[in-house]
Amino acid sequence: MKKSVIIVGSGLGGLTCGVILAKNGYNVTVLEQNAQIGGCLQCFTRKGVKFETGMHFIGSVGDNQPLNGIWKYLELDKNILLSPLDTDGYDVFKIKKLKYSFPIGKKSLLEKLKIDFPHQSKQLENLWMKIDLVVNNSSIKTIGKNQIPDSEALILGDLPLDNVLNESIEDETLRNILVGNLPLYAARKDRTPFSLFAFIMDFYRNGAYRIIGGSDTIANSLCKTIESYGGRVLTHHKVEKLNSKENFAREIICDNGTSFTADEFILAIHPARFLELTDSHIIRKTYRERINNLQQSPGCFSIYLNFKKNSVPYMNFNFYSYKNNTPWDCEYYTKEEWPKGYLYMHFCNETNQKFAESGVVLSYINFNEVEDWIGSKIGQRGEKYNTFKANCAEKLLSFLEKDFPGITNNIAEYYTSTPLTYLDYTGTEYGGMYGISKIAGGGALTRIAHRTKFSNVHLAGQNVNSHGFQGVIIGSLTVCSDIFGNSEFLTNTFQENDR
Ligand SMILES: Cc1cc2nc3c(=O)[nH]c(=O)nc-3n(C[C@H](O)[C@H](O)[C@H](O)COP(=O)(O)OP(=O)(O)OC[C@H]3O[C@@H](n4cnc5c(N)ncnc54)[C@H](O)[C@@H]3O)c2cc1C
């Protein structure tokens, strides 16, 4: 008889585990609390115009790139069309008055930086060697292989990014440029490990792509694949309880009264939500305290822009702007200072797009700004909340207008969201962009193991390995290998030449 698995959460983590398990003979059921699947892959449509709320671009999935094997294994190549971002500058930054862009390609960025900072050539080469050392010893290169990671790489990867950059690069301007895209990993000075920077640099060095038609096409494709292998994905199923006997989970109960039993359970949700499902003594108080006290990544205020027809040329790159001469510390601000920085991107409807139909501007905002409205419902948070959002939008749009004069005249309508929106739509603690913060030197105490005290309950998703397309998928591969008791299936998913 087929083994059964219940997966809680239909974000990238839950759905990729679902595909892998369904393809390996498991009877898969995915339970999602919302009306829409996808978590951070969700899009919404207003007046026929579509907006992405989370994932906006991905890397490394093209031919001969590190994630190409898993991309095909997940059958995403059958349904997803990608549009490459500008080769010469997929990430463009404005750091106060300085403008810079990152080209795609492992060597191209290094060469460009060496030309612009010739006095730092040797230092840049050394930094690139450090990035390679960390990446070559990370799960993406070692998963499914009997390779023991180099301890020097592990130590280096766990050092604070800021320290490594300060030691490696003398030129302050260059250091600031190197972290120009840090909102992608919600980096915090002195705390974010060097490994996160190394993964991001490596992920997009191979290629960066928008998802044509929006990130929800990834969720829909994964769902279709699960169903084609006999599985199912059920929306409007908020899991509220996990019943267990000693260290064995037996049953899951949903808010609509339905219950599900299975051999294995994967909780692809924030670990704080997992703790709410069980009061079993198996989960020790110290574990609960540790999870509940972990630092969360910052949340964001988002403006979704609906542009007037054919008024805004399509921008085939990501644009980051910082008021000060450093990208660091945008999450620390006074009311007067906010917003200190933002990330601006356009939605991709088709290849060779001429004009943007919609776009998004994201800026860090602290949860305490919206905590007065905790417990209120979406659309019913009241006038004060609406005024708060309108004020934030006005400030953020006037910052955008400075960088793109005339843009506000081309906005037909806009919508906004806060960390409360993310909390409600994804269940992520404090609506943090990427779940639990990765802390340099924090060791095991700041990490979430995918195994739990229940022998048949596993955690997956961005809080387990790392966030983003690559981080979440590597986490799913690890969890599934553990359930299978071997990693043989990985040889199919990662061809040697893909790595
Ligand atoms: C604004 C933003 C921009 C981003 N941009 C990028 C990008 O450009 N590129 C990139 O690679 N990554 C990006 N990311 C990160 C990436 O989107 C996430 O790391 C990833 O999608 C998280 O997937 P997940 O499955 O771990 O969690 P989630 O997507 O949060 O999914 C969790 C799911 O579980 C459901 N759930 C929670 N509790 C329950 C319950 N009790 N019962 C049932 N269901 C439940 C939620 O409703 C949700 O659907 C971005 C994220 C954000 C927020």
Image (cartoon, helix red, strand yellow):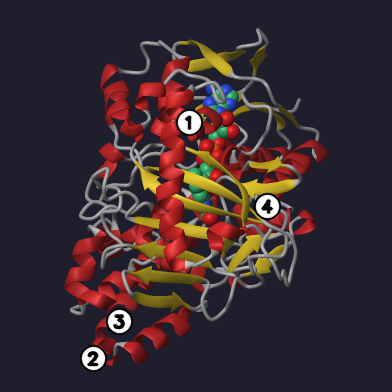
Q: In this view, does 309 lie above or below 128?
A: above
The residue under the point 76% across, 32% down is 231
Q: Quick check: can you spot residue 489? A: yes
Gap in angstroms between the C-alphas marked 2 and 3: 10 Å
Q: Are marks 1 and 3 in contact (CB under 8 Å)?
A: no
Q: Name the residue under label 2.
A: 119
Mark nearer the N terminus (1 vs 3): 3
Disc 3 packing (10 Å; few <14; some 14–19; many ≥20): many
Q: Mark 3 points at which residue?
A: 124
Mark 1 or mark 4, which is nearer to you? 1
Mark nearer the N terminus (1 vs 4): 4
Q: In this view, does 105 lie above or below 221?
A: below
Gap in angstroms between the C-alphas marked 4 and 2: 42 Å
Gap in angstroms between the C-alphas marked 1 and 3: 47 Å
Gap in angstroms between the C-alphas marked 4 and 3: 36 Å
Q: Name the residue under label 1.
A: 386
Query: Which dot marks residue 214?
Result: 4
Disc 2 packing (10 Å; few <14; some 14–19; many ≥20): few
